[in-house]
Image: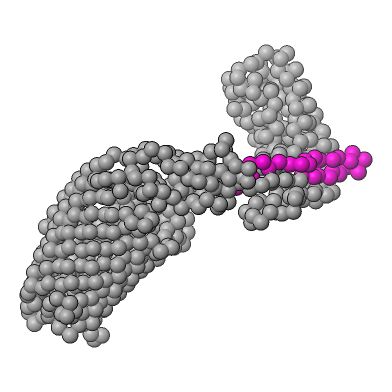
Amino acid sequence: MPVATAARNGDHASRGKPDHADLLAIEIDGIDTALAQRLAEGVRLTRESADGYRHPARLNRLAGEAVDEMQAMLSALGYRQAQVVLTANPQPAKNSPARYRVTLGEPLRYRTFDLTMTPPPVKDPELVTGVELARESLRAGAVVDQERYEQEKDRLLALARERGYFASRFTRHEILIDPEQYEARGRLHLDPGVRSQFGEVRIAETHLEPRLVQRMIHIQPGDPYQNRVLLLQEQALMDSDYFSSVSVSPSVALQGPTGTLPLTVVTTPRNRYRYQAGAGVTTDIGPRLSVGWLNRYLNRQGHRLGLEGAAAPVQSSLEGEYRIPIRDPLQDSLLLRAGWSSTDSDSRESELFETSVERSIARGPWREGISLRALQERFDAGDDEGRSFLLVPGVRWERLWSDRPQFPRRGYRIALGLHGSAETLLSDADFVQATLSLGYLHALTERTRLIVRGDLGATATADFEDLPASYRFFAGGDRSLRGFDFETVGPEDGDGDVVGGRYLGVGSLEIDHRFGESWGGALFYDFGGAFNHRQQPVEHAVGTGLRLFTPIGTLRLDLAAAISRDGLPWRLHLSVGPDL
């Protein structure tokens, strides 16, 4: 599109020499560039010049008409005393544009503007706030901008109808101009009418039991209507993983005399089965292969069955999970699990068979899990070797928030766990253990972030030697203490073998910077360890790394040095996962 050139106080901007096909149709002096651009884009001369019309007589006629067109646009913007003068006709043969000089003059302003809701304001804070914002824009002393006036009208009506005031209208909408005093009075009276309410929710034919879907509906009959609530309900149903599409729509034609709107929920089922296969590598456990299978709905009650398996040199596992939705299927479920896992690291060997039952429920922003685990573990950690059966009740709370899924600028994670076992409850060991995991992320600049992580743990037991390796604390590795090998930091036996500790305390301070859209770098400091008493030394490590930001999480390639120990080589760490 041709671009208007404008300069203040008659000082022209520098002008190139466009070719005949890209003739600069209009050049405007006397106003700022943005307004000149807006005027140029609104006249026929610019459009036809851009389309290739070059007949001199036609261009001269359009150049004359552009004076009136610009005058009308300026008047709508409040400059009713503006003057537009054509100073030079376009000359296509010389690639010479049409030239204009604009004198804006004093803008027309509102002496008063009466913006009210009638009848008296409804008890709807968002609508009241919307009216207050419009009053800020259309206030006494503001320039009479017709476009802004219409935009505020449209915005108020759209807000009212989004919030269920379907009969909303303006009983008065006018701008009265006094040409002698050169001032205006505006009136805008909004009558929102009766606000509609949500009515009965009807579930259309679905592959699940209608009562199950009904328990996923958080909209209650009698709640005030809001479009946003419908969108949130649709998203919640999609997040259940039962459906490939969801529509929650009001039946306006069936609206009752009191403004009650029945709702209809229409769903399309997702594929019943999901298959997964993957391969990866980390420096903690080496190359890893994984497979997974999920039946999203075994029956119309929404029960699910999933199987997952993974194999790696250090850790391998196989687990099955049966999920039963209860009261609110989106937030409340019963999980039955059975599995096997094996760990063979430099510090320990462990083989574990486990069954568990867990009630997982959302409590506001927190996710709570109350569980009972039954496990049989064979372990070897230094001089401690044995086989234990444990019946472990436990509870866990977790809260996670970030402002966006990829490269978040703000976020935090809190996870708190408490569990234990007792010989009086058929277990081979008495212990109580508490864990706390924290993460915090904050943007320092547009591309630089501070990431803080910490993990704490404490175990109370009189017979630590009987405690299986899976309930001991170890430190070191990609997501613990970089600069140290996986699980090589902790209390040692007489032979110098790490056996794990009663307590855990590790932390990390990291600054990363995004150099490109999908990659960046980082500097970090890790500290802490696993302990049996306060006198044991705290380990320290520093390093730098490369970051690749991917849809599945951040890929980290770190080079770290353990500065608290002499003789340890720099270590390379490779991992992938969320920032928190």
Residue at 62 percent across and 27 percent down: it is 2
Q: Position of residue 160 (x, y in %)?
A: 64, 46
Most extreme residue toward the right is 180
- The quarter in which the C terminus is drawn is bottom left
| 172 falls in the magenta region | yes
The picture quadrant where one finds residue 71 is: top right
- Which sits in the foreground, 280 or 574? 280
Q: Residue 22: which quarter of the image?
A: top right
Q: Is residue 78 left or right of residue 196?
A: right
Query: Horizontal and vertical percent for residue 523?
Result: 34, 63
Q: Quadrant of the N terminus?
A: top right
Residue visible at 66% across and 47% down in the picture: 194
Among the 4 quarters of the image, the one containing residue 182: top right
Comparing 159 with 250, the one in front is 250
In the figure, 170 relative to 221: above or below?
Answer: above
Q: Residue at x 7, y 75 (%)?
A: 385
Q: Judge whether residue 578 can be spotted in this image.
A: no
**Residue furthest out toward the front:** 257
> Which range is magenta?
159-188
